[in-house]
Image (cartoon, helix red, strand yellow):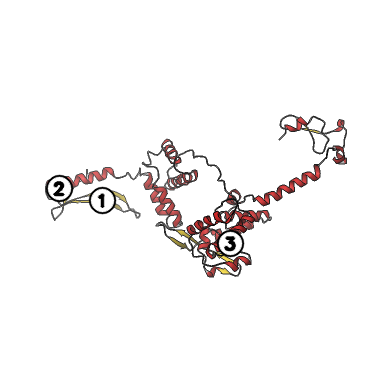
């Protein structure tokens, strides 16, 4: 139990060991009671004892303290918007000490979050917990995350982009943002951070981004989202002729105005501003541009995200590709009721010499190019 000492002024003073600072120096918590009587001594010792009993054990800290310290250490190297998101996650972090954190408690916490938040949110908040525990040498709990269905996103086609641009053509800020998103694959933050010095002819230099800080204010971060996002983008001449730089908007304003424009312009389906990047990549793939060049132009570090999210199918291109397949099949296999006249000469063999292969369902199916010798029901069962 801490022992109080009397000061020259007559007050009672007590110190309790509180741990070590970053330099390894001992830290003490001080308590002072101005009551000069013996009751003052008892009161001072009682306050110090209560604080010592409620103080977290350095060897068994609270989970929220561990995560909070992790955020503080990483704050100098992470984006302000990332720190802001981490602080929001911290408010919903699992409670209790490290020794109380086990798989069952963590799973109940995940189950509770899944009732109110999306699977992506839960994955992010658990990722923060796991990173913080691993950073300090603790083992993260093993949990089962809620399954998530892939989002039903729509990639705009050329017709959608024409309708959108026709509607916003006389609205320079939003028109400039959409031109850069659709034909330059720039992100919202990259567009809003552009200055006149970043544009030279039809070459646009991307080296910074507009982000929201921990207090919710927008400011320009003098670095791009990733190292690969520092790039030079070349856009068509009709884009540079219409650009107004800077656009004078922050990313949230871009999204809000874009959403209203898509609703009013007559597009077949609604889509987000970020889907303009989907359009850019999908068109590039449809034109046969190699992945390495698309990654460089779009500022991706690897092709994992690009393949998983951005390389979508376009409705008009899909129809064209389907027509190619249909025409191919029609040209090579349109028998018109006369099998013998359409089968290649080298495939016309007698049934005795015909070559057969066995399918995975253990049914005999004639090899490609040979005249069928069984009932049509045989082929109907094959996938």
- Asked if the residue under mark 2 is in contact with the one under mark 1, i.e. CB atoms within 8 Å, the reply is no
What is the spatial separation of the Cα atoms under label 2 and label 3, in whole angstroms? 74 Å
Return the disc, 1 or 2, that comes first in the chain's sequence.
1
Relative to the observer, which residue lies in front, 252 or 293?
A: 252
What is the spatial separation of the Cα atoms under label 1 and label 2, in whole angstroms? 18 Å
Quarter holding the N terminus? Answer: top left
Q: Quadrant of residue 348?
A: top right
| In this view, 2 is above or below 226 | above
Q: Position of residue 222 (x, y in %)?
A: 48, 63
Q: Position of residue 355 (x, y in %)?
A: 82, 34
Number of numbered markers: 3
Q: Helix, strand or loop at disc 2?
A: helix
Quarter holding the C terminus? Answer: top right
Asked if residue 230 shows in the view, the reply is no
Residue behind mark 2 = 40
Q: Helix, strand or loop at disc 1?
A: strand
Return the disc, 2 or 3, that comes first in the chain's sequence.
2
The crowd level at tag 1 (other Cα within 10 Å; few <14, some 14-19, many 20+) is: few
- Mark closer to the observer (1, 2): 2
Relative to the observer, which residue lies in front, 71 or 373?
A: 373
| In this view, 50 is above or below 375 | below
Q: Quadrant of residue 217?
A: bottom left
Residue behind mark 1 = 29
- Mark closer to the observer (2, 3): 3
Return the disc, 3 or 1, that comes first in the chain's sequence.
1
Q: Residue at x 15, y 54 (%)?
A: 7
Q: Residue furthest left?
A: 37
The crowd level at tag 3 (other Cα within 10 Å; few <14, some 14-19, many 20+) is: many
Q: Position of residue 107 (x, y in %)?
A: 44, 37
**Numbered tag placed on residue 179 in the rendering:** 3
């Amino acid at each position: 139990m801490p022992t109080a000492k009397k000061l020259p002024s007559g007050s009672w003073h007590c110190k309790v060991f509180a741990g070590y600072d970053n330099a390894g120096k001992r830290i003490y918590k001080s308590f002072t009671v101005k009551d000069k009587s013996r009751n003052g001594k008892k009161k001072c010792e009682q306050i110090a004892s209560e604080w010592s009993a409620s103080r977290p054990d350095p060897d068994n800290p609270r989970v929220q303290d561990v995560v909070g310290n992790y955020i503080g250490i990483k704050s100098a190297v992470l984006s302000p918007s990332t720190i802001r998101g981490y602080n929001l996650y911290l408010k919903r972090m699992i409670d209790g000490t490290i020794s109380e954190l086990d798989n069952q408690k963590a799973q109940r916490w995940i189950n509770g979050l899944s009732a109110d938040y999306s699977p992506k949110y839960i994955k992010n908040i658990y990722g923060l917990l796991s990173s913080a525990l691993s950073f300090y040498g603790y083992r993260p709990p093993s949990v089962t995350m809620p399954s998530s269905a892939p989002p039903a996103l729509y990639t705009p086609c050329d017709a959608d982009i024409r309708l959108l641009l026709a509607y916003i053509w006389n609205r320079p800020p939003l028109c400039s943002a959409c031109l850069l998103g659709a034909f330059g694959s720039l992100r919202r933050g990259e567009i809003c951070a552009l200055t006149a010095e970043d544009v030279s002819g039809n070459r646009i230099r991307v080296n910074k981004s507009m982000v929201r800080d921990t207090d919710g204010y927008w400011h320009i971060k003098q670095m791009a989202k990733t190292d690969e996002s520092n790039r030079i983008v070349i856009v068509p001449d009709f884009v540079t002729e219409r650009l107004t730089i800077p656009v004078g908007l922050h990313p949230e304003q871009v999204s809000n105005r874009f959403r209203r424009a898509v609703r009013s312009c007559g597009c077949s389906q609604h889509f987000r501003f970020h889907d303009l990047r989907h359009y850019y990549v999908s068109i590039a793939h449809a034109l046969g541009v190699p992945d390495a060049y698309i990654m460089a132009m779009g500022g991706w570090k690897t092709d994992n995200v690009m393949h998983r999210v951005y390389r979508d199918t376009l409705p008009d291109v899909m129809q064209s590709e389907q027509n190619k397949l249909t025409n191919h099949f029609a040209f090579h296999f349109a028998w018109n009721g006369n099998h013998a006249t359409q089968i290649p000469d080298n495939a016309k063999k007698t049934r005795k010499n015909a070559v057969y292969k066995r399918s995975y369902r253990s049914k005999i199916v004639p090899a490609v190019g040979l005249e069928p010798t069984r009932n049509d029901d045989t082929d109907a069962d094959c996938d």
